[in-house]
Image (cartoon, rainbow, N blue to C red):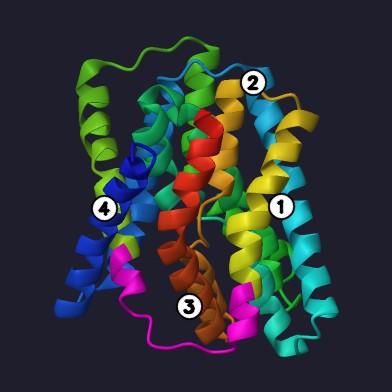
């Protein structure tokens, strides 16, 4: 029962957001912008600034994430070809299979499961996911039409990137921020987890129906079952420490990122399929994430 507790704590807050999204007219874009430009960079900065991450640990996680996303993209492309899905749906399968909810759901789950002391590792994974999503993800969602200049611009607009750089600079030069700055940052960062989970719930409340069941099953299988297996293999290959490996594997077992739906809609892709993969991976993760957590703890 203990392995269900971290997931149930996360899901209970998501359900609050789901109910709110169904009952009230929530301006999700405003809430999403607040998360992207205020709560997330503050949380990332605080997590990295107060962490004791070593450079070799960070580099190992970066390498592990790159290997992970390459494997997931290759798997989705291969599955689309072998199963004969129409070309217009392959982009949706790739987006739904590849991009992980390492931030919205991954960070809170890791904190509830392993404690706040490992949040720095979870933040690195989430930041890597954000960078890949805003580069490779944009390319996939646009059907390969987005150029390099626009992709670079999209990454440079992310405040999280600058939060990471500032945190590493502060740690590198052992710069101590004064209390009157750290206290407000700590307060804002503390609001990140509940707000991001409520936002996830309000976005799931928009789900309206099922389309292309075989494709949704394929995407869900890759995301919840195959992805953690890849993560286990990568952890051995990159010789991650047990503590870092636990965080990495658990985050790679998370459901599909809700932002894949937003990105797909932005480029006029098949939003119904993405919505289905996001919805079912999130619901089924109530069962699969405790399974992987039990595996990691034993």
- Callout 4–callout 3 Cβ contact below 8 Å: no
Nearer the N terminus, badge 2 or badge 4?
Answer: 4
CA gap between label 1 and label 2 equals 20 Å
- Tell me the residue that label 2 is attached to: 241
In the image, taking residue 32 as reference, residue 265 lies left or right, namely: right
View extreme (left): residue: 23
- Tell me the residue that label 3 is attached to: 275
CA gap between label 4 and label 1 equals 27 Å
Closer mark to the observer between disc 2 and disc 4: 2
The residue at 84%/78% (across/down) is: 81
Mark sitting on residue 69? 1
- Callout 2–callout 4 Cβ contact below 8 Å: no
The residue at 28%/59% (across/down) is: 14
Is residue 203 rendered magenta in the image? yes
Q: Quadrant for residue 260, please give it.
A: bottom right
Up the image or down, 12 lies above or below 185; here it is below
Q: Residues within 10 Å of mark 3 (few under 14, many from 20)?
A: many
- Tell me the residue that label 4 is attached to: 195
Nearer the N terminus, badge 1 or badge 2?
Answer: 1
The residue at 48%/49% (across/down) is: 289
Residue 13: where, in percent of width, then height? 24, 54
* Highlighted magenta segment, given as a residue range: 201-217
Query: Depth check: 290 or 134 in front?
Result: 290
Residue 273: where, in percent of width, then height? 55, 82
The residue at 50%/53% (across/down) is: 288
Is residue 144 rendered magenta in the image? no
Nearer the N terminus, badge 1 or badge 3?
Answer: 1
CA gap between label 3 and label 2 equals 35 Å
Residue 268: where, in percent of width, then height? 57, 86
Nearer the N terminus, badge 4 or badge 1?
Answer: 1
Query: Depth check: 31 or 224 in front?
Result: 224
């Amino acid at each position: 029962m203990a392995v269900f507790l971290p997931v149930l704590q996360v899901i209970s807050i998501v359900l609050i957001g789901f109910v709110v999204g169904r009952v009230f007219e929530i301006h999700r874009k405003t809430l999403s912008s607040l998360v992207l430009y205020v709560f997330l960079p503050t949380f990332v900065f605080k997590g990295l600034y107060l962490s004791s991450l070593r450079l070799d640990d960070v580099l190992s996680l970066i390498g592990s994430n790159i290997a992970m996303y390459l494997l997931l993209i290759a798997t989705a492309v291969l599955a689309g070809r072998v199963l004969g899905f129409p070309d217009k749906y392959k982009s949706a399968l790739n987006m739904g299979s590849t991009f992980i909810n390492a931030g919205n759901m991954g960070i809170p789950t890791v904190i509830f499961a392993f404690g706040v002391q490992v949040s720095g590792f979870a933040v690195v994974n989430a930041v890597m996911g954000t960078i890949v999503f805003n580069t490779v993800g944009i390319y996939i969602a646009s059907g390969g039409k987005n150029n390099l200049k626009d992709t670079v611009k999209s990454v440079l607009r992310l405040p999280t990137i600058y939060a990471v750089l500032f945190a590493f600079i502060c740690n590198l030069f052992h710069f101590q921020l004064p209390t009157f700055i750290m206290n407000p940052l700590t307060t804002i960062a503390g609001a990140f987890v509940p707000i991001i989970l409520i936002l996830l719930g309000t976005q799931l409340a928009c789900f309206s129906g099922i389309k292309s069941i075989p494709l949704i099953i394929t995407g869900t299988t890759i995301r919840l079952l195959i992805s953690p297996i890849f993560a286990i293999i990568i952890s051995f290959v990159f010789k991650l420490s047990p503590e870092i490996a636990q965080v990495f594997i658990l985050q790679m077992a998370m459901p599909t990122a809700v932002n894949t739906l937003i990105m797909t809609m932005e480029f006029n892709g098949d939003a119904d399929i993405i919505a289905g993969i996001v919805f079912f991976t999130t619901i089924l993760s109530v069962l699969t994430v405790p399974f992987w957590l039990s595996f990691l703890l034993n």
